[in-house]
Image (tube, helix red, strand yellow):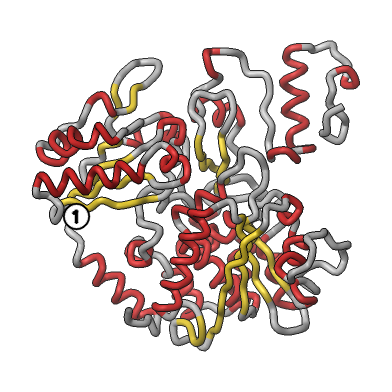
Amino acid sequence: MKKIESPSDLEALRQNILSKRDPKRQVVKVCCSTGCRAGGSLKIIDAFKQELTISGLEDKVEIKKTGCRGFCENGPVMAVDPDNIFYNKVETDDVPEIVSETLIHGKPVERLLYTDPESREKITCEKDIPFFGKQVRRVLANCGQIDPTNIEDYIAAGGYGAIGKALSSMTPEEVINDVTDSKLRGRGGAGFSTGLKWKFARQAPGRPKYIICNADEGDPGAFMDRSVLEGDPHAVLEGMLIGAYAIGAEYGYIYVREEYPIAVEHLGIALEQMRERGLLGENILGAGFNLDISLKKGAGAFVCGEETALMSSIEGKRGMPRARPPFPAQAGLDGKPSNINNVETWANVPLIIKNGVGWYTEIGTEKSKGTKIFSLVGKVNNTGLVEVPIGVTMKEVVFDIGGGILKGRKFKAVQMGGAIGRMRAFPVFEFAYRLRYPTADRRNYGIRRDGGHG
């Protein structure tokens, strides 16, 4: 694999990849994330390969393994391009009919199309399904579209253009200013200004400096980080490249749950591909910028989702939170300046640098811009992965996207933030309870003032 030695090399490679692609060629994109794999998507891939060979189409149709499209309740899901035909609840027995009807004759298989629960009409295109209607897929834009194990797919989609721009035309301070002005806040839950966090790490004395990706997603029902790493690992790694350049770090770690085997596998593949292409190591893109990233697998300790406990685990110690100050920006990993962001935060960074602050701040609230990914689980009709602009109401998420409560039952409560939702969950619980019992006293319905349960 030829190394990419400059931003112009990167752009030339991108154009070369695109020039070899026929926009009219049929591509079957099968979701192979954790949820759809559990439903048999890998067997569906094998069935397609066998059926295409029988039909003599193995050289004419591309079968692509992709990441999560989000519609987990209806998996396994797949799409046929360029016809924009979306199929849900696919089984291996459906493959021969898809090949004969859709790939050969261009007709959709009606029974595999999504059925609108109210109108009972069949919907052909993914974008017309209500579940996707109010979503704004920015971080998840590549999930379901590219092969996460193929760096060329990511590059063809514009990948690594942001780090090329940063290294060739921006100073580290300018990068930090853009991230600050974008009002990107930590997506791990703390909501602290990402740009300000980077500024503290850059200004802190001492070397080496470290960047860390917190992928120790431990909240029950949460699978946002897992899905991003499974479906678009290079976006996270490109964000880390940009952050390391801005902060002045030369070493990085991704701390990922060992219970995420697909994410671990895809990250390992992505890191190796980056090294082969010269996007990790010394003199990246000919800019004199050096960075190496190591993969560290967690052992399932919930507490290691806390950043100081995570650093202790990387150091080979027991994962225990440390007293602060000093904060990680001053004395983090091995006592050196360190910056920790979670998966989703890092994945937002290339979007800001590539598209500009103006584009990024078009959506969101006054204090927090961009989108947020949610794992929508529980007693709703459409469970899955949802990306919406920050500031949308829970009503829109639960009813417009989630399709409302199962069996038409009444909405009672929703918990934000998993098992430790605390104050974020409390107002919603109280609101839901008071809708039902408007004269009840707070002390009598089992919720403490701090958001815990009595």
Q: In the rendering, at what x and y percent does residue 156 appear?
A: 32, 64
Vertical arrangement, residue 151 with respect to residue 431, above or below: below
On the image, the x and y values in percent for residue 129 come to: 37, 30
Residue 288's place in the image compared with 178, above or below, is below
- Depth order, front residue of 77/424: 77
Residue 414 falls left or right of residue 295:
right
Question: Residue drawn 73% across and 12% down?
Answer: 436
Quadrant for the C terminus, please: top right
Name the residue at 43% across, 69% down: 160
Location of the N terminus by quadrant is bottom left
Q: How many marks?
A: 1
Q: Is residue 155 above or below residue 248?
A: above
| Residue positioned 9% across, 49% down in the render | 56
Quarter where residue 326 is shown: bottom right
Instruction: Mark yes or no: residue 24 visible.
Output: no
Please tell me whether mark 1 sits on a helix, a strand or a loop. Answer: loop
Q: Position of residue 163 (x, y in %)?
A: 48, 72
Around disc 1, counting alpha carbons within 10 Å, would you say few (fewer than 14), some (14 to 19), or many (20 or more)? few
Residue 335 falls left or right of residue 260: right
Which residue corresponds to mark 1? 23
Residue 193 in view in this figure:
yes
Q: Residue at x 44, y 66 (%)?
A: 269
* Amino acid type indicated by mark 1: Pro
Which of the 4 quarters of the picture holds residue 171? bottom right
